[in-house]
Amino acid sequence: MNPLELVGAEPGPAFTVTLDGREITALPGQTVAAALWAAGVTSWRATRGAGRPRGVFCGIGVCFDCLVTVNDRPNQRACLVPVRAGDTIRTQEGTGHGD
Amino acid sequence: MVGAACALYAARSGLDVTLVDRGPVAGGTTGAGEGNLLVSDKEPGPELDLALLSGRLWADLAEELGEAFEYEAKGGVVVAATPEGLTALETFAAGQRAAGVEAVPVAADQLHTLEPHLAPGLTGAVHYPQDTQVMPALAAAHLVRASGARLLTGRTVTEVLRTADGAVRGVRTDRGDLHAPVVVNAAGTWGAEVAALAGVFLPVLPRRGFVLVTEPLPRRVRHKVYAADYVADVASDSAALGTSPVVEGTAAGPILIGASRERVGFDRSLSLPAVRALAAGATRLFPFLTDVRALRTYLGFRPYMPDHLPAIGPDPRVPGLFHACGHEGAGIGLATGTGRLIAQVVAGRTPDLDLTPFRPDRFPKEAG
Amino acid sequence: MATERPHLAVIGAGPAGLAASLAAAAHGVRVTLIDSAAGAGGQFYRRPPAGLGARRPEALHHRWRTWRRLGDALAARVEAGTIRHLADHHVWCVEPVERAELVVHALLGPLQEEPVTVRADAVLLATGGYEKVLPFPGWTLPGVVTAGGAQAMLKGGLVVPGQRAVVAGTGPLLLPVATGLAAAGVEVAALVESADPKAFLRRPVALAAHPAKVAEGVRYGARLLRHHVKVLPRHTVVAAHGEQRLDAVTVAALDTHGRVGPGTERRIACDTLAVGHGMLAHIDLAESLGCRIDGLNVAVDEEQRTDVPGVWAAGETTGIGGAALSLAEGHIAGRSAAARLTGTRPDPHTWARAARSRRRAREFFAALDTVYAPPAHWTDQVTDETVVCRCEEVTAGAVRKAVDELGAGDVRTVKLLTRAGMGWCQGRMCEPAVAGLAGCEQTPARRLLARPVPLGVLARAGDPEDD
């Protein structure tokens, strides 16, 4: 049983967002992180020093590991920000400020 | 920091040195500072002479240890927003040049070549290539290490031990006595308390400052940039809150924003008015900062002296007692010169600078 | 204005904040409940958003009836206008101003760029807690998440991070995380607990006093069996493996001294590791207000008052203790605040039941604390190359060097000398690890800003014309 079946979910209509230009299907109410997990993506940031991949760690907005660029705004916490139809999500490197 | 520098130069002059601190290394004002080694904010006089000496010594140390404490000769840029402000700034700079400071006028149309993200509409600036920065806690720790001094942290001095004829013979701590014919008071903002243990009056007072630290950014602020009114603020005697924006990028990425000054004792709670003024000043200088996030703010207590000069040298009231404290916001920058001068006078040699302006007994004890 | 009822701002809409808001609103106080989430409930009662149309959200929860009662009561109070609920408000500072007034400064989510202020006569801090995770080689790999994080993503987003998980660490949270993931279709390869929960059997007094907790434990045990989850007590994860993401973990048995037994290591293939070592309180707002901190928690009196006038605190922020304790503390805090704000003398007899359950819950958690503990020698497994500060990528080797060569003996000095704790999370994740590696106690970090604030917002904060 998957999580949606477990709670008898009847989600609203799915919509499309992009991750680095690639189309991803998301459900209304999901966070960016949840949409990415549902699409099988678990990392979307490379660290400033060693360039290592990171994604969700704490899941509640405390650790800032899941930073991502949404609609050209860098350093958003993917675990907090709800995904909206048409969002442009970009993986980010370094400080997220184009360095 | 000053204690670490005293230890280093004293040890290098052949003395056996023990360094005692009730907290950790850099646990006082050093750990709350930005690590400025500035000449730009000093008018000609004894403090500037000390800053120039210190700058040379820092450069020497940087040859040995510079990478370890992030020595960066980034230079300072002092900007003026009005024609009157610029005239005052240029007059000030002319005096500094006469005293040996490199101070290069920057025309309004050249400002953005120097600092591309500065706000438009500024009148002009002066560039001070000698202004430098170190990471203060690392500097203190590496100077202590290089000194080879015995380091006793977490140990509180409770008494200055004296001989029958009044001379210093060591200190008592909460974990035993330490015997030495010379005691240097490098307790910074808490220097008055140590002086009092030796029975002498030294008016070091805490002057609180906040620093704001942003999220990590690519290097967008190249120099230490501040407004011309900063100098007036430093020299002010007011206890009330004074702020003037001081903005600088760091090698690690975050931008540091100072500087607020207020005399409120050792109050460690957040003052939103102080932090708000810092943010307002910084965003006026660099509009791009408006959307940049502050990750933290911290505070420290500068060792303020009524005449804005540190106490450096022997205390004629207590033989064997030396003071090296009260550097206000310039303790990191002035530490090396102070350490060198202390090592010289402890060894009985003639110091590189005349210590008269820094005499520890220059303040008449207040009534009562 | 004189006719208006006194105004209490409650920060945090988890069990403590909800109980406090309801109690205060029922006793003559106007309440503004300020919370960062889109819906009330906190981490404990985190639920999927309406858009996901969950018909049976209770399948991922226990004590759902309590939530229904709280949620319904809140809805009624909001309807009646005695509680104003500000969702998606991220509080960064509480500022005491003149005339015994406090100003709550928040950022409007989700972008957290626009400021909002709330003026109140008193503030009640119910800011909850977050998970503590101790490092081990590989813990920064994608696929390694906190146990609470896995649960939050499941409860709130109805998603799981992979197909095969190991749940590891220590503490009572691991049980619901393992059973929750299993129920949601994840194969839970093992539940690795460094403590020996059987130690509880040696505490019959603590157990006998809490039959509901015993029943809860039995229920979880049955669910683990049903999902074929292998439980490895007195075991620990010593490393996580993978290149770009997790593909396996190595677990090992612990001896009676809390050391890894040589030769007991075994590798378990998995794409997910949910790991946690207990909880820490959010105390930033209390710290910037200058409230007295006891250890790592906000110090409160019998009425849940801090030592700063007009500031109450309840729930995990005063000490980790679970939802039942939070409800009791919140109720007492709300009653006390209401009484004092309306100028009546608080009468503890009127909240005797809550005081009793507060005492029992604290006793129970004290007993839990003696059982659930990370391995005594966990730092042995942390290689010098292991990143300790996830934000600034400071390694254990750098921390050890600061301690051994530069004389750092406390968390703050290590931070100053290495940058561990200076990044985005401001040390919330690495402080327990740094303290362990430095061999010192973890001390409050004095985070004067509770979250990142745009400088443009800060530059206008508290301007009267902005209110």
Image (cartoon, coloured by chain):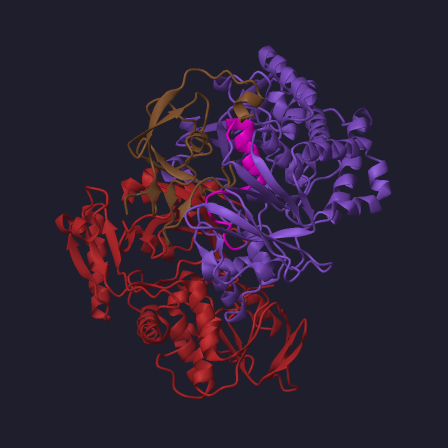
Chain A's colour is brown
| Residue B47 found in image quarter | bottom left
Chain C's colour is purple
| Residue B99 found in image quarter | bottom left
Q: Is residue B156 left or right of residue B59?
A: right
Residue B13, given in percent of the width and then of the height, sits at 43, 86
Quarter of the image that includes the C terminus of chain C: top left
Report if residue C144 lies within the magenta region.
yes
> Which residue is at the far top?
C80
**Chain letter, red:** B
The total number of labels drawn is 0
Report if residue C261 lies within the magenta region.
no
Q: Nearer the viewer, residue C331 or C140?
A: C140
Q: Nearer the viewer, residue A80 or B286?
A: A80
Quarter of the image that includes the N terminus of chain C: top right
Q: Is residue A88 left or right of residue C377?
A: left
Residue C10, given in percent of the width and then of the height, sits at 60, 28
| Residue B133 found in image quarter | bottom left
User: Which residue corresponds to the image point at 65% horizontal and 28% vertical from the top-left?
Assistant: C15
Residue B247, given in percent of the width and then of the height, sits at 33, 51
User: Which residue corresponds to the image point at 68% horizontal and 40% vertical from the top-left?
Assistant: C172
User: Which residue corresponds to the image point at 32% horizontal and 71% vertical from the top-left?
Assistant: B55
Asked if residue A61 shows in the view, the reply is: yes
Q: State the extent of the magenta-drawn residues as a range.
A: C137-159
